[in-house]
Image (cartoon, helix red, strand yellow):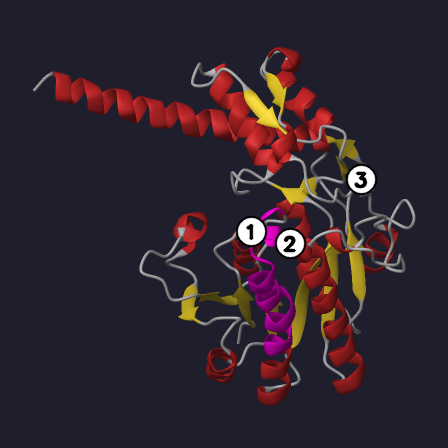
Amino acid sequence: MPKTAVITGITGQDGSYLAELLLSHGYRVVGVVRRSSAPNLDRVEHLLDRIELRPGDLLDQLSLVRLIDDVRPQELYNLAAMSFVPASWDQPLLTGEFNSLGVMRVLEAIRQVDPGIRLYQASSSEMYGKVREVPQTEGTPFYPRSPYGVSKVFGHYITVNYRESYGLFACSGILFNHESPRRGLEFVTRKVTDGVARIKLGLAQALSLGNLEACRDWGFAGDYVRAMWLMLQQDRPDDYVIATGISHSVRDLVEAAFGHVGLEWQEYVRTDPKLFRPAEVDHLIGDPAKARAVLGWEPTVDFKGLVGMMVEADLARLSSAGHVAASFVGRIAGC
């Protein structure tokens, strides 16, 4: 019988890549989706004939218990979260409900129904915040600088606590920034690559950004979900930093994206003070030595390759949308 895996947050960037990976390994994949009058299934639309979608909600303990009891998975990947850091200042209580108490609800559901289920919990490099050392390792103290980061610290430590208290096979992946063409437009990487594509195609004249000096360790989401899976294939549960070990500034991101299409970024980028964070995270760079040694994990896509991939995807998307719009206008004009 194939393994069964449950993925919360399957409709997000990471969930869609993880579903593809698990299907390639022969898993039965069950995705958890919140009940909605207009579900957002764009990222998994190409998988709908191969995955199962079940209703469930990190705010509703009973829905999680019922789901796990019915599906009886061998693995559960908890990727659902309030994941946009700037929004966590606007909705700090809801962020805590999802990212902190939501994790505890998942852990309790596993403990009550089947403590043998292996759990992956999505932790975040934002937990390091005002970094205490560079690069950051699994042992670096946390100093979060946003409600999002604080909520993720709770989720991380409650996962460790349930592992040590109840013997659950629960792992936390401390993932540094990981991007792809499936990243939401509200994130700076997609904001930049979408903006570059629009400027190149003549659909926009400028791009407004915040702090160009903020540094992040950016990798490809498709590589990072492979690390999630590898964690749950080990003999013992543990926590791992997943990163490239190379840091770039937002300025580097901008230069690479505009350079990919042969444009000078200084002619188009505007700095907007309103886009600065209330408390900035200055220099995130992870040390993936443990993941390399224990999991045998290595990233396969470098920074320039990632940026180029995203710019090309946005160019193709916007060109296709423009072609469709032009065809529609032409048909209307010919009526």
Residue 195 position in % (x across, y down): 53, 25
Which amino acid is tagged 2?
A: Val
Discs 1, 2 touching: Cβ within 8 Å: yes
Which amino acid is tagged 3?
A: Asp
Q: Say whether disc 2 or disc 3 marks the residue closer to the N-terminus.
A: 2
In the rendered image, which quarter contains the C terminus? top left
Which amino acid is tagged 1?
A: Tyr
Q: Residue 204, relative to residue 281: is it above or below?
A: above
Q: Mark 1 points at which residue?
A: 17
Q: Name the residue under label 3.
A: 282
Tell us which disc is closer to us: 2 or 3: 3
Whether residue 179 is visible here, answered yes or no, is yes
Please tell me whether mark 3 sits on a helix, a strand or a loop.
loop
Q: Residue 216, relative to residue 152: is it above or below?
A: above
Q: Which residue is drawn at 90% across and 44% down?
A: 134
In-image side of 183 versus 55 (left or right) = right
Tell us which disc is closer to us: 1 or 3: 3
Q: Residue at x 60, y 76 (%)?
A: 106
Whether residue 27 is visible here, answered yes or no, is no
Q: Residues within 10 Å of mark 1 (few under 14, many from 20)?
A: many
Please tell me whether mark 1 sits on a helix, a strand or a loop.
helix
Q: Residue at x 56, y 60 (%)?
A: 22
Residue in the foreground of this view, choosing between 229 and 66: 66
Q: How crowded is mark 3: few (under 14 residues within 10 Å), some or many (20 or more)?
A: some
Residue 62 position in % (x across, y down): 48, 83
Q: Residues within 10 Å of mark 2 (few under 14, many from 20)?
A: many
Q: Identify the mark at residue 225; answer none if there is no mark.
A: 2
Q: Say whether disc 1 or disc 3 marks the residue closer to the N-terminus.
A: 1
Considering the whole magenta stretch, tell me its main secondary structure. helix
> Which contiguous range is marked in magenta?
86-106
